[in-house]
Structure formats: structure tokens, C-alpha cells
Image (cartoon, rainbow, N blue to C red):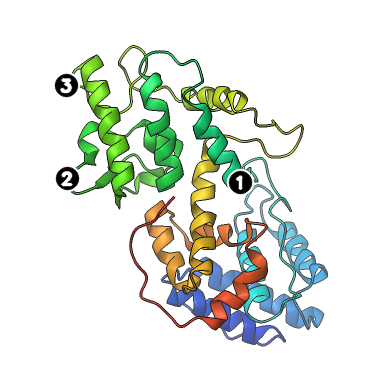
Amino acid sequence: MKRYEHTSALAPDIDAFLDYMRRCGKESSTRYWMMHDFDRYCERVGAAALTREVVDGWIRERLERTSPDSRSWISCIRVFGRWSRLNSDPGAYVLPARSYRTANSRNVPYLLSEGDVDAFFGAIDGTPLRGPWRWQTACFFALMSSCGLRTCEVRKLGVSDVDFGAMRIHVRWSKGNRSRVLAVTEDVRDVLAECSARTDCAFGDGRRAFFVGTGGGPVGASRPGALFRRIWAQAGLPWPDSGPEPRPYAFRHRFAYANIERWAAEGRDVEAMLPYLAKYMGHSCFESTYYYVHTSPDFMAGFADATRSTDPLLPEVGFDG
């Protein structure tokens, strides 16, 4: 993989950032090239720090040279900004997630609080539900909340994908066809076992899908979202008038930053743990996991101290919700 020599005032930070990504096992020829291009821009304009003017200037210049519909490379400078703020320059500019977005850009997630989660699960029993959703609903959303699964991964979970004895599940229908085997806690195993037993009684043990619709067939794509909104309303939780809206995927998002906050509170080396979190969540690139570092409003203030003051720890496999 080709490396480049950097010569701008930001060269030491660029080199350290790329070395950090390499040590995390996330080398990328695209990232090397983009940071080289950014370094050349900084050298040309005499940039001495990572400021908004410098970042916006580089992006605008690149947009004039590239397709406006291809903007995935912008995430590179956003991640570099986060890294710089945590490791070298507390005043480094971090490009907001909504900046330079296209129609296909990632949506800003709704941040669930611990109170939201407690109220949601507390309202399930009081929500009028039909068919197998009377006993499946709590288990379905518990997998998302406790294991950080995507909605489609829970919908398409097969009976044969759940190993109760080994306390693990096989996620086959993952984004980008990246299957993975996940360890689960005893509590999650017990919830899965109870749900499976009740479904067997209602539909027989010959079904292939772990979660089924009212007719016994696979769960439709729109069903989890509709159920989520009904339970949210039953819990008396407010629906925002504007901005990000709560949806099932918010459980996966909370799983990520709740673990990050917990590790920091326990004095663990958070940076050493992130690659394991990426593997558990099935992320294809480390940036997708690093994104969660800045999403919790209560976490960023203490993250730099937590990562600088702790001794490296051997990361443990397994995550609590």
C-alpha cells in the first residue's frame, strides 16, 4: 500500500492519525490518498491548525474536481478532526455530521436515554398486541438493545441460528453479507428460550424463522417500526416535532455508546476496545464504530482523559446492553 510524505504544518498529526488507524487494523489506500491531498492543500494555503476555514476550503476545492454525488471521502476529514481533538489539539475543528450531506448520507440518529429504554420495555406488557407479537415483542427489541443488532438481522434470525447451550447466536443476514457469531448473556439466552418455546407451542417446531408474523411466516420489513411507534406512544414518551425521530435502530446506536461510556467509567482503554466493538457490531470499516465516540453528550468531555490516563488492557470479548 503506497505511503506518502507529508510536509505541511499538520504533517505530524496526519502521520500519527494514519499510524493509529493502521494499528487498529484499518489501513486504507483511499484514506492515505485523501490525507495526502489534504496535506498538499494545507501546505499550499499555509494552514497552521485544523480550523473550519481550512476544512471547508479543502472540501469545496475537492467538490469542484469530483462528482457531487460521491462524498464518502468527506468522512475521512471528519474522523481526523475527532482524532485530533482527542489526541493533539482540543480546539481542532470537527466537521458536523450534516455538513455536505447528499440524499444518501447517513441520518443523524435519535439518542435514547436510559429512561427512554426503561419506559419503552415497561410499556410492552400494556400495549395491545396481536398473535405472536404478544410474546415476541420484548425478545425482538431486547436483542437490538442488548446485542446491538440491526433490525433486519433480528427479523431474519433463524431457529438454527440460536445455540442455547453455547449461549451464542449466528447472525447470517448481515449488512454486506458479513455474517458473525455473537456471545450473549444468560439473561438474553433465557429470554430467547422462553420466546422460542411459546412460538413452538403456537406454530410447531418445524418453522425456520425464529420470529414470525401473525400468519406464521417471516416478519415483514415494516412491522418492527410500526410496533415500536405503538409501544413508544403507550409509554407516554414524547415524539419530537423536528430533528431525528426515534426508531428501532436507535437501540443499536445506544448499545454502542453505552458500552463506550461504561468502559470509560471502568477505567478501561477505550481505544483498545473499539476494534472489538466494531467486530461485534459487524462494521465494515473502523470509522463506523469511531463515529459513536462523539454521539453521547455526556461522554466526550471525559474521553480524552480516560484514554490518556489508563494503562492498556487486554480487551474482553462480550458486551452488556
Amino acid type for the residue under numbered disc 3: Gly
| SS assignment at label 2 | loop
Residue 1 in view of the camera: no
Tell me the CA gap for discs 1 and 2. 33 Å
| SS assignment at label 1 | loop
In this rendering, the answer to whether 260 lies above or below 310 is above
Q: Are marks 3 and 2 in contact (CB under 8 Å)?
A: no
Q: Earlier in the sequence, mark 3 or mark 2?
A: 2
Q: Nearer the viewer, residue 75 or 114?
A: 114
| SS assignment at label 3 | loop
Please give the residue where the numbered disc 3 appears in the rendered image.
206
Circle 3 packing at 10 Å, graded few (<14), some (14-19), many (20+), is few
Q: Is residue 248 left or right of residue 170?
A: right
Label ID, residue 165: 2
Q: Nearer the viewer, residue 249 or 266?
A: 266
In this rendering, the answer to whether 25 lies above or below 12 is above
Examine the image and state in which quarter residue 155 appears.
top left
Q: Is residue 286 left or right of residue 233?
A: left
The spot of residue 98 in percent (x, y) is: 71, 50
Tell me the CA gap for discs 3 and 2. 20 Å
In this rendering, the answer to whether 162 lies above or below 4 is above
In this rendering, the answer to whether 133 lies above or below 86 is above
Q: Earlier in the sequence, mark 1 or mark 2?
A: 1
Please give the residue where the numbered disc 1 appears in the rendered image.
113
How many marks the image carries: the answer is 3
Residue 24 in view of the camera: yes
Q: Is residue 316 left or right of residue 116?
A: left
Q: Quadrant of the N terminus?
A: bottom left
Amino acid type for the residue under numbered disc 1: Ser
Q: Are marks 3 and 1 in contact (CB under 8 Å)?
A: no
Amino acid type for the residue under numbered disc 2: Gly
